[in-house]
Image (cartoon, helix red, strand yellow):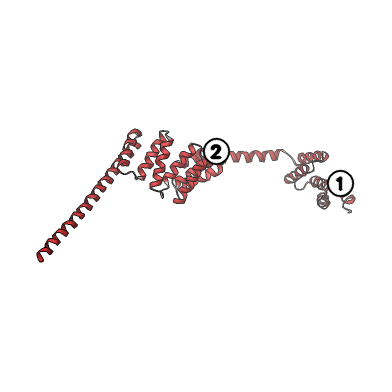
Amino acid sequence: MELNNIFFKIKYQKKINYFLMLIVFLLSIQFIFAQNAEEYFNLANQNYKQQNYNEAIKNYEKSLQINPNFAKANHNLGNVYYLLGDSKKAIKYYNLSIQNAPNESSPYVSRGLLYLDLKKVTEAENDAKKALNIKPDSPDAHFLLGNIRHFQNKKEDACKFWKMAAGKGHPQANELIQNKCDNIVNNQKKENQKKENQKKSISAKDFIKSGEIKLEKREYKNALLDFEKAIELDNKNGQAYFGIGGAKFAEGEEEEACKAWRKALELGYKKAKEMLKGVCSE
């Protein structure tokens, strides 16, 4: 009986040892495969930096043959095809990278940039938003949004996002800010200066004259705008207030007309007295 127990224990122990050895073997194989996949991946990255794209493709593919779920290899292979102008293959590998690592923001940004190149703005913006949902402080996602806004001709918004990207360390954002945004600021300053010069070159008398002509043509609203512009240039001009009174009276706003004529008289424009007497009973 004791001998049977001993044989049973020996047999049981052999089975345990067998399973332990099998587990160790499988783990070793898995480790070797993972190690080889990483080695090909690193080699492909070197090829990529050296702009040896054909070799990079070969080594990324070898890495993926060993580990098809290697998200970074899929992403980088997508980048190679993007650079080579093969958008279909690039999108294919970006999709695989997102599928294998849905919580990584970088593949969304890369795919978004490619969509923007293809003028698929809605898809590009969706990818930018997904990247920001995953990583709210992503400089790449803010850079992408800047590019999208620039494509949409929303230059101020583009500069806003590029500045956010630059503040978070994006290497290309500063260059775009210097080339695009500084010009926008300078152009805006020039435009403001031009408007200011135009205002100065046109006197209050010019606007009053224009307003009186429009009153004669019964263009009362436009006349009123001219008189108001005259007051912006010279708020002590009684003739301008007199003109406002005339435009208001023509539009049936007697109370407002009388108010304007009183101001005109207060500023020394004597013709207003006649209107106050005849219309306002003063």
Where residue 210 appears, as percent x and y from the top left, is: 78, 39
Task: Measuring from the top left, give residue 186's x and y in whole percent.
Answer: 57, 39
Q: Quadrant of residue 153?
A: top right
Which residue is at 34% across, 33% downward?
A: 54
Seen in the picture, residue 13 relative to 279 is either above or below; the reply is below
Badge 2 amino acid: Asn
User: In the picture, which quadrant includes the N terminus?
Assistant: bottom left
**Location of mark 1 (residue):** 271
Report x, y in % for residue 250: 83, 46
Residue 171 seen from this side: no
Disc number lying in front (2 or 1): 2
Q: In this picture, is 281 found above or below 217?
A: below
On residue 183, the disc is 2
**Identity, as a three-letter code, of the amino acid under mark 1:** Lys
Residue 116's mark? none
Name above or below for residue 104 compared with residue 58: below
Residue 36 image point, x, y percent: 27, 43
Mark 1 burial class by Cα count in 10 Å: few <14, some 14-19, many 20+: some
Quarter of the figure with the C terminus: bottom right
Q: Residue furthest left?
A: 3
- Earlier in the chain: of badge 2 and badge 1, it is 2
Along the line of sight, which residue is nearer the eye, 250 or 58?
58
* Residue 95 visible at all: yes
- Residue drawn at (52%, 40%) of the image: 121
